[in-house]
């Protein structure tokens, strides 16, 4: 069974609020860089970047990380593939904001952190997620949260973005 | 994706019909020319000889071809357009596009479907799919289910409750919907429904009869910016087809909460369906609970969009043209007379528009006058005013019916029982019945209960009765007249009430400074300066319309679209406006038909949306003082009246009698004269309709006839023809009918050329004969006028034309009434071919189910 | 109905017919272009001491409804219309507009060329006007001599705190003459609301331990309010999520150094396109605005412009850079008007939740 818990309007609003909070917490957007975790995190990062540009008339670098093999909903036995890393900017000295659609066990984020640290020394790394569904297995927490959606372990959260899925929304599947 | 467009294809709406007046052609005319202004070439295909868009360079290239998937496929292959516009040809065009998509025609030719996702096509043609989609969007839709037995049917009723509507699935004979109020009704309807159904099934549908019917129109661009153009309210409740209902713009009786609920739903639906352009959404509102249902979503041009555009002054068509060329509402380019952001300003009105349906019953006598869910009106007119009363009275007046349709001071002969029956089961012209009931002292709440019409309107009707009574009781009283005029009465009304003449009343009014003032129809309620050059009259303090500068010509438009040749008349009016402008006249149109092509903003320099009553026209003439006035076919008497008052009037109709020609396969010579010389266009012929297919009621006109022998015979008669035509002494277009006596041709009768023939010759020659008519009527000589007319002898293609009739739609099967005379026509189709046979085949194509 | 006159301070007079109360009254006249919602507009306290002219020609067609009040005691000085619907009362329509205005001692005048009046006011800006029985020199003298009060907020805002209990977030609404739509939207989101007078001090607010504070709509010129209001805003905005609306928005801007200017022509309607800067989306909202934040006086290191009116570029929304404090000039609750802006209340609720931290 699928149930839409966040519609496109609410999703849009969550992204807007995350953007404002980024400005609030970073005291501006100088040195801010966004890194989206593939697939949907990248589109979410791009939307946040577009919002920042609208407000501040400045271009924000957006990078992509592909850590499919580390996805929390994959069995742990899946072979650890190398992390694909597509950043056309240097993370050194940047206030990097990692962006993902769903925060669950925290393992994806740990992998992403490893990958990022390997590429240079950012001034800071923070984490923005559209959905925090709980059930963390690592000491990781998000700095910017679109929606806190309490879930049961066996449930799944499906984030849809227009670019991939044709529409925006968040659904619970059980 | 490459969004650059350089060439687009428009599928026209085909022949006019019930439910299809000029609104589609008007949209094509405006959208076509707006797209061309953006540097995009327009290809148009249509088979309507009275299409204004298909003449006068409104499109870069016009195909007069059957509206079939095959014919359009060939056009797409030949033209390779980048885009196809789906929203201008009504539901028929949507069906054609579905065929084109299925056959991969669009894909194979890299033609993009503009405005819509391909998936929307399926939703538009299949109401059940649309209904499911709306459900997904959490929009309430009417519950409807197919059942195969009583138990299943009962199950449905247990969830939705009575009343329900029972329909037979795939009935073997024409079966109607049955409204069931209780179990007894229900069982009877089901038994009958199962019996009639080929599949032994019925549809049980929740009934919303008696709900308020509300219609909202929105526009949306590809970026998702959307706004509401207009909200309108049907005076008549659900159960009467909305086209047969009296409609008010803006909504009159719904609260802001209800209004905003419909506004949000309209914009949400457009957003979810990704519609670029305009969309019409119909709702049913339960007046006691505020619950509503979405009844229908129409993303293509229809009468409601035309009404919204005319009522608000918001340039819907021009804006949609910009949107489909991928501009956003913020980027829309409008003529300089509009404020820059007009496309983005949500229209607000400071006037009220009332639309009144027009019936075919004066011609088709055997049709039931009962109003129900099947559309019967042939058209509509609007009245604009500054109060509900004024809008209603002006709308009623614009129907050109007798004034007793407006004011019920005539006692009716209905018995009490009859009256109540008519209140509950409404018939056409019900306004009289409502007024009669009020006159007999029925209470307003009681009437609202019986008719399901909001009590608000009965207060307004009571007010009209009170004003009329005050008028009658106070002959030549300034206050009574001033008040009556303020609420929409005229000199004629006062003259009748006072047993005087309109001229005397007019004189009295002017002496007492009771004068019509004009206000602009514009979309910002006076908040901004907008110039739409469209005005309506009222009786207030401030007048906004001043005389146009330059040589002014007033053209009196067709008004109500009646059954018969009226649709052709609208074509003539549009053509006159077009060529008068070319001849450096400042054109002024008086018309109250919202669907009329002539209302296209670029056709006239100025428009007055007014009824065609003499006093209304005189008020306009007093402001504009035109050099010349044009009347068209149906207004010969009006023209005579104006001539008597000293105005210079050009009557397109010469007042000569015209015979109703039945099919006799005899030729006719089509000519033009300036009064001193005569030129022959060519030979036409009327052939029996059953050359086409059996069951054809009307006849088929053919032009040109290139028969050598016949041409020679006519050449021999040419001197006689010229003499006979010149004997009339009136410049114009004439048809000279010939008969065959002893195997030789002889002159029979001479009559003014019909509008149908004018359109036929214009389309066949590719050159407008209306232009020629206009210039000879203005007193120019033939040699000056005919300079660029093509030589008919070189025309190799044969054109054929036939009328279409509404007999099926109106369920007329009476042999005596199904005559196929032009007076019954609601539309006309045209086709061509290398041979007569090929032309007739083409005429039939795509029209197999059309009533010829 | 009796002949009455609408007279304007520029010397013009309109003959009309009186309805509602037969009182003579004077106020500032403004025109409103909304298509629906006359009851909400008449009862909105932002129109305190003003005369409202409706451009929509027929007013009163559905009477007065119990769920469309924006305040309990309307204080407009007059209602000017082309046509007032003379409906009587029945089970659905408790009162007609005429009856209601009589009860509330508000005069109305109908049969006015409101289109001409709107065009006149568009050119002149708001003027003093009176609804009178005789339009003689005496009446114009009286009108000229009338000084309109500048203590509108004190006249309409609650003098005492009152609760609107629910089980959710604890929200304080500072009342400058609030419209009920604000309470309605907070109620829908289960907020436990306490309404405080506009004179509430920082301490009084903090002592109630709110999750968020709303600065309400209200009438008049923001500069007419005491300096202490600005101090209160400065003290709470960095401690508690803040949402300011209408007059509250103007005060929030002033508290952060911006200046307020008189707006001409004013905005009274719901037809203007408004751009949400962050998404570049165009929305429509209910507006009732005689003043605006002067864009040139905004300290961009402090405030971000979030909404802009595309007709005249006026600022329609602001946000503090460093903490969740934001404001809108328009009425996000609609009532009357578009409802697409209601999600700003959701944004406020989310800001409060975010400030509280996750629930597990």
Image: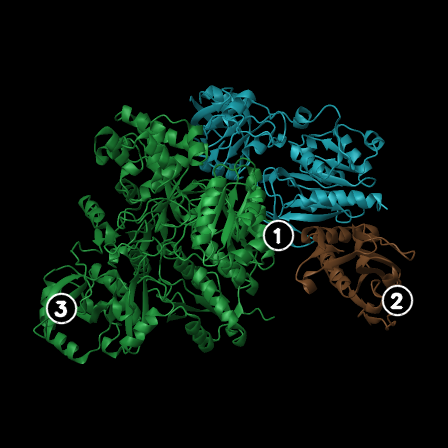
Q: Residues within 10 Å of mark 2 (few under 14, many from 20)?
A: few
Most distant residue in the right direction? A139
Q: Which chain is green?
A: B
Which residue is disc 3 drawn over?
B738
Q: Residues within 10 Å of mark 3 (few under 14, many from 20)?
A: some
Residue identified by numbered label 1: B137
Q: Nearer the viewer, mark 3 or mark 1?
A: 1
| For residue B369, side relative to residue C17 (left or right) | left
The quadrant of the rendering that contains the C terminus of chain B is: bottom left
Residue in the picture at 16% in, 56% down = B656
Q: Horizontally, is A19 left or right of B690 in the view?
A: right
Q: From the image, which quarter does the N terminus of chain B lie in?
A: bottom right
Does B742 sit above or below residue B563?
A: below
Q: What is the letter of the brown chain?
A: A
- Chain C, hue in figure: cyan
- Work out how far the residue at label 2 is from the one at label 3, CA to CA, in angstroms: 96 Å
Query: Is C195 in front, or is B624?
Result: C195
For label 1, count other residues whose C-alpha is less than 10 Å away and answer few (under 14), some (14-19) or many (20+). some
Q: Residue at x 24, y 29 (%)?
A: B498
- The dot on residue A76 is 2
Left or right: where B794 falls relative to B219:
left
Task: Say what secondary structure mark 3 lies in.
Answer: strand
At x 61%, y 58%, the residue is: B223
Q: Disc 2 on helix, strand or loop? A: loop
């Amino acid at each position: 069974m699928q149930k839409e818990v966040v519609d496109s309007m609410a999703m849009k609003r969550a992204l807007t609020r995350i953007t404002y909070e980024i400005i609030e917490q970073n005291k501006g957007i100088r040195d801010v860089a966004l890194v989206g975790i593939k697939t949907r995190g990248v589109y979410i990062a791009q939307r946040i970047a577009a919002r920042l540009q609208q407000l501040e008339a400045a271009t924000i670098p957006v990078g992509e990380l592909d850590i499919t093999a580390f996805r929390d909903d994959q069995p742990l036995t899946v072979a650890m593939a190398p992390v694909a890393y597509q950043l056309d900017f240097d993370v050194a000295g940047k206030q990097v904001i990692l962006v993902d659609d769903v925060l669950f066990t925290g393992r994806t984020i740990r992998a992403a952190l490893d990958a990022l640290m390997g590429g240079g020394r950012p001034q800071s790394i923070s984490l923005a997620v559209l959905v925090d569904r709980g059930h963390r297995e690592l000491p990781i927490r998000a700095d910017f949260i679109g929606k806190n959606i309490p879930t049961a372990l066996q449930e799944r959260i499906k984030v849809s973005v227009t670019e991939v899925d044709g529409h925006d929304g968040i659904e619970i599947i059980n | 994706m490459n969004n650059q467009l350089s060439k687009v294809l428009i599928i026209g709406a085909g022949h006019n019909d019930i439910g299809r007046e000029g609104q589609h052609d008007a949209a094509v005319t405006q959208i076509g020319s707006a797209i061309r202004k953006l540097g995009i070439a327009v290809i148009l295909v249509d088979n309507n000889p009275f299409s204004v868009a298909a003449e006068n360079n409104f499109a870069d290239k016009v195909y007069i071809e059957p509206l079939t998937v095959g014919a359009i496929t060939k056009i797409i292959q030949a033209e390779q357009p980048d885009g196809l516009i789906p929203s201008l040809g009504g539901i028929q065009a949507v069906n054609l596009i579905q065929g084109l998509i299925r056959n991969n025609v669009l894909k194979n030719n890299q033609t993009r479907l503009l405005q819509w996702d391909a998936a929307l096509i399926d939703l538009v043609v299949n109401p059940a799919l649309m209904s499911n989609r709306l459900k997904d969007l959490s929009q309430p839709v009417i519950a409807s289910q197919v059942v195969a037995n009583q138990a299943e049917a009962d199950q449905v009723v247990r969830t939705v409750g009575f009343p329900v509507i029972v329909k037979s699935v795939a009935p073997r004979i024409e079966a109607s919907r049955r409204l069931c109020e209780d179990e007894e009704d229900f069982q009877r309807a089901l038994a009958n429904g199962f019996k009639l159904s080929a599949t032994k099934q019925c549809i049980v549908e929740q009934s919303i009869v008696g709900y308020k019917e509300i219609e909202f129109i929105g526009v949306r661009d590809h970026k998702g910016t959307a706004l509401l153009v207009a909200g309108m309210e049907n005076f008549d409740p659900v159960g009467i087809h909305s086209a047969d209902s009296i409609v008010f713009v803006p909504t009159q009786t719904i609260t802001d909460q209800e209004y905003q609920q419909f506004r949000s739903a309209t914009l949400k639906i457009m957003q979810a369906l990704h519609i670029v352009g305009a969309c019409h959404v119909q709702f049913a509102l339960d007046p006691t609970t505020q619950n509503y249902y979405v009844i229908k979503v129409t993303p293509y041009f229809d009468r409601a969009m035309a009404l919204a555009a005319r009522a608000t002054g918001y340039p819907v068509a021009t804006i949609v043209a910009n949107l489909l060329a991928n501009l956003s509402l913020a980027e829309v380019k409008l003529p300089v007379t509009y404020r820059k952001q007009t496309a983005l300003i949500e229209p607000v009105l400071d006037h009220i528009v009332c639309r009144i349906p027009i019936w075919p019953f004066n011609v088709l006598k055997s049709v039931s006058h009962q109003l129900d869910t099947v559309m019967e009106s042939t058209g509509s007119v609007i009245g604009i005013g500054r109060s509900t009363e004024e809008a209603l009275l002006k709308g009623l007046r614009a129907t050109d019916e007798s004034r007793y349709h407006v004011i019920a001071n005539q006692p009716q002969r209905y018995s009490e029982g009859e009256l109540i029956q008519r209140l509950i089961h409404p018939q056409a012209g019900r306004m009289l019945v409502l007024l009669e009931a009020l006159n007999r002292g029925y209470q307003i709440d009681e009437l609202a209960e019986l008719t399901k019409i909001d009590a608000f309107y009965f207060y307004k009707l009571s007010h009209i009765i009170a004003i009329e009574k005050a008028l009658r009781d106070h002959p030549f009283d300034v206050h009574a007249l001033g008040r009556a005029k303020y609420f929409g009465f005229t000199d004629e009304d006062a003259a009748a009430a006072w047993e005087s003449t309109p001229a005397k009343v007019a004189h009295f009014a002017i002496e007492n400074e009771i004068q019509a003032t004009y206000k602009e129809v514009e979309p910002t309620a006076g908040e901004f300066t907008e110039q739409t050059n469209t005005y309506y009259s009222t009786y207030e303090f401030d007048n906004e319309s001043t005389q146009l500068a330059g040589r002014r010509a007033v053209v009196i438009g067709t008004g109500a679209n009646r059954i018969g040749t009226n649709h052709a008349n609208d074509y003539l009016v549009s053509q006159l406006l077009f060529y008068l402008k070319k001849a450096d006249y400042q054109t002024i149109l008086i018309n109250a038909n919202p669907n009329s092509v002539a209302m296209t903003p670029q056709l006239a320099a100025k428009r007055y949306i007014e009824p065609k009553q003499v006093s209304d026209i005189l008020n306009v003439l007093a402001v504009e003082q035109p050099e010349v006035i044009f009347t068209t076919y149906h207004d010969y008497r009006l023209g005579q009246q104006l001539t008597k008052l000293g105005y210079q009037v050009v009557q397109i109709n010469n007042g000569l009698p015209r015979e109703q020609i039945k099919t006799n396969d005899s030729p006719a010579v089509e000519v033009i004269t300036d009064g001193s010389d005569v030129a022959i266009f060519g030979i036409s012929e009327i052939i029996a309709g059953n050359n086409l297919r059996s069951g054809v009621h009307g006849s088929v006109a053919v032009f040109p006839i290139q028969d050598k022998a016949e041409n020679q015979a006519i050449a021999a008669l040419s001197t006689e023809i010229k003499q006979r035509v010149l004997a009339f002494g009136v410049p114009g277009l004439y048809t000279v009918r010939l008969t065959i006596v002893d195997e030789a041709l002889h002159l029979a009768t001479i009559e003014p050329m019909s509008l149908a023939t004018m359109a036929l010759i214009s389309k066949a020659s590719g050159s407008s004969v209306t232009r020629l008519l206009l210039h000879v009527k203005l007193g120019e000589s033939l040699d000056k006028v005919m300079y660029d007319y093509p030589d008919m002898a070189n025309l190799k293609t044969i054109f054929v034309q036939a009328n279409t009739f509404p007999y099926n739609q109106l369920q007329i099967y009476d042999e005596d009434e199904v005559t196929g005379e032009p007076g019954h026509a609601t539309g006309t189709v045209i086709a061509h071919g290398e041979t007569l046979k090929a032309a007739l085949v083409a005429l039939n194509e795509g029209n197999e189910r059309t009533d010829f | 109905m009796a002949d009455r006159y609408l007279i304007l301070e520029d010397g013009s007079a309109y003959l009309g017919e009186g309805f509602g109360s037969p009182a003579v009254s004077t106020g500032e006249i403004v025109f409103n272009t909304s298509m629906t919602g006359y009851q909400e507009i008449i009862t909105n306290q932002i129109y305190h001491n003003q005369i409202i002219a409706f451009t929509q020609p027929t007013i009163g067609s559905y009477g007065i409804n119990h769920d469309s009040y924006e305040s309990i005691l309307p204080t407009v000085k007059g209602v000017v219309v082309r046509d007032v619907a003379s409906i009587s009362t029945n089970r659905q329509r408790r009162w007609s507009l005429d009856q209601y205005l009589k009860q509330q001692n508000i005069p109305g005048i109908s049969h006015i060329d409101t289109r001409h009046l709107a065009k006149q006011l568009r050119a002149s800006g708001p003027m003093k006007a009176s609804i009178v029985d005789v339009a003689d020199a005496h009446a114009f003298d009286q009108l000229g001599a009338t000084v309109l009060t500048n203590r509108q907020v004190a006249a309409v805002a609650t003098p005492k705190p009152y609760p609107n209990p629910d089980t959710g977030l604890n929200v304080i609404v500072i009342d400058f003459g609030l419209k009920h739509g604000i309470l309605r939207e907070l109620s829908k989101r289960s907020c436990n609301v306490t309404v405080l007078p506009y004179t509430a001090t920082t301490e009084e607010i903090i002592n109630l331990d709110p999750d968020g504070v709303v600065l309400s709509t209200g009438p008049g010129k923001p500069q007419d309010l005491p300096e202490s209001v600005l101090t209160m805003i400065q003290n709470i905005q960095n401690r508690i999520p803040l949402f300011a609306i209408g007059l509250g928005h103007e005060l929030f801007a002033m508290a952060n150094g911006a200046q307020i200017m008189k707006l001409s022509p004013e905005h009274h309607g719901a037809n203007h396109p408004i751009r949400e800067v962050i998404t570049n989306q165009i929305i429509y909202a209910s507006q009732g605005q005689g003043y605006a934040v002067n864009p040139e006086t905004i300290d961009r290191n402090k405030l971000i412009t979030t909404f802009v009116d595309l007709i005249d570029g006026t600022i329609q929304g602001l946000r503090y850079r460093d903490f969740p404090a934001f404001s809108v000039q328009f009425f996000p609750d609609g009532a009357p008007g578009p409802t697409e802006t209601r999600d700003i209340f959701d944004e406020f609720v989310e800001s409060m939740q975010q400030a509280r931290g996750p629930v597990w």
